[in-house]
Amino acid sequence: MKTFGKLIAAGVAIFAALQAVRPSIPAGPATSEVQAPPEIRRILEKDCYSCHSDQPQLSWFDQVVPAYWLVRHDILTAREHLNFSTLGSKPVAVQTATLYEAANMIQLGAMPLPSFRRLHPDAMVTASELAALKAYLAPWTYAPIQTNTAPHQDVTAIAETAPRPLDAQPEFNGLAFDSSFENWKVISTTDRGDNNTFRFILGNEIAFQAAQTGNVSPWPDGTRFAKVAWKKELGPDGLMQPGEFVQVELMLKNAQNYGNTDGWGWGRWRGLSLKPYGQDAHFVSECTGCHEPVRGNDYVYTLPITAAQASHIEAVNNRAAALPVGLPYNPLQWNAITMYVDPKSQTTATLYGNDIAMQAVRARRGDPVSPAYQPGSVLALVTWAQRDDPHWFGGRIADTLKSIEFIQVASAGQTNSYRQFALPGLNEIQPAASRAALRVNFVLGMAPARLP
C-alpha cells in the first residue's frame, strides 16, 4: 500500500509539474476579418473561431496538460490553413472561395472536427446555420463577366500570346507535369458556380478502365487524373462555354511513393505558361486538407460517369451513364472536345469525337476556331439534365440523359449524316431536314476547349 501511495503521489507531482510546460497560443485582436454580413460572421464566430482565428476560446478542460498540448497543435494547424482574423486582407475572390470550402467541409461533416464537436457541442453547425451560409454564397445567382461574340462559328481572333513551355517545370514536391493528359478520356465534367469555371476531369487509361469496372474504392496504383479548368464565357446564344484556360491539376496514385500524402501525388499548373502553383513543397497540405472529407472515396471528389457499380455510396454517377440501347456508337468511350451549359434549361452538354475527329481537334487545340473535320469523323453531342454535386456545394454535374446527337462527316460533295436520340424514351427521332442542317452546323462550329 505504501508503494501504491508513493506511486500516486509521484503521479500527482509529475502531473502538476507538467502544467508548467505550457507553450503559448498566440492571441490578439482581429486585424482584417472576413468581409461578410453580421449574421454570417456570428455563425463563423460561434462554430469556427475557436480554432480558425486569433481569438481562441478554450474551455477549462482544454487548459489541462496534456489536453492543452493537443488543442494548441490543432489551433496552430488550423490557423495555417485558414485564419478568419486575417482573411479579410486577401482579395474578395479568395475570401469567397474560402467560405465555399468551409461550407463544403461542414456539409461533408469534416468541420468542426468530430473529436472537437464531441467535447464542444456548442460548435455544432445547425442545419439552419449551414442553410444561411449557403444562401449567402448563392453560387447560381452571379452574372457572367465575359461574353464571346461568336462561340460556335469560325472566328479570326488572335490566340493568346503565352506560348506553352517545351518542358513545364515540376511542382515543388517533385511531381512532373504530364503533357499526355490532353489525350486522356473524360471521366466527368463539372459546372462550378462557386468560382465561375467549367472543368473536365480526365483520366489516363488505368483510371478510365477502373471507372468502367467500378474499381474505384480505392483507385489502382498508376491512376492519373487531370482536372482542367476554364473560365466560363457567355455566348450570344445564351449558352455558357469554356473560355480562358485557367489551370490543370494532376493527381497520381502511388500508395508507396506518396504514403505521406494520402497515397496521391499532387500538382497544379496555372495559365497558358503552366506555372507551378506551389511556393514550396508545403503546398501539398492545401491539397490533402481539401480532399480529407472524401477520404472514404479514396480522397477523390469526382463521381465518374460509368454504368459500373461501386461498393461505396455516391462513388460513381450511374444515372448519367444510362445510354439507351440501339445507339450506333458509345460516345462515352471517346475523347471530349468541349462542353457547354444552357442556364435556362439547366442542362449540360459534352461534345465527344471518334479517333478521326480527334486528329483534327488536336491540330487546332490552341486556336479559337472549329476544326476542319475529315471524312469519317463522327461527333456526338450528349446532353444531360444537371444536378447538384453531392460532394461539392457550388458545383453541378451531369444527371439524366436528355438527348444524343451524332454527326458523321461525309466526303466532299456529299451530305453529312445526322441522327438524334431524344426524350421521351431516348428513341431515335426524325427531325425535319432544315432542323437537322441547323444542328449539324451548330455542332461542327463548336470550337474545342482551349489548351496550352
Image (cartoon, helix red, strand yellow):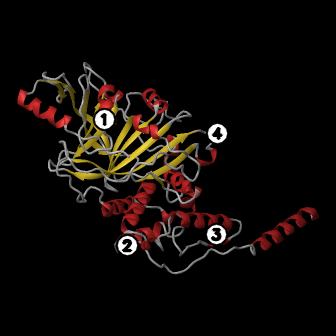
Task: Identify the amino acid type marked 3.
Answer: Phe
Q: Nearer the viewer, mark 4 or mark 3?
A: 4
Residue mark closest to the camera, 1 vs 2: 1
Task: Give the distance between the C-alpha atoms of the residues marked 4 and 2, in whole angstroms.
Answer: 43 Å
Judging by the rendered image, the residue that carries numbered circle 1 is 361
In this view, the mark in front (1 or 4)? 1
Which of pointers 4 and 2 lies earlier in the amino acid sequence?
A: 2
Q: Quadrant of residue 75?
A: bottom right
Residue placed under numbered mark 3 in the picture:
61
Label 2: which residue?
35
Q: Residues within 10 Å of mark 2 (few under 14, many from 20)?
A: some
Which element is circle 4 on?
Answer: loop
Q: Is residue 443 above or below residue 174?
A: above
Q: Residue furthest bottom?
A: 29
Distance Cα–Cα, label 1 vs label 2: 44 Å
- Where is residue 252? Give x, y as percent: 53, 41
Residue 256: give its label: 4
In primary-sequence order, the first of circles 4 and 3 is 3
Residue type pointed to by label 2: Gln
Say above or below: 45 vs 345: below
The kind of residue on which mark 1 rests is Val
- Of label 1 and label 2, which has the lower sequence position? 2
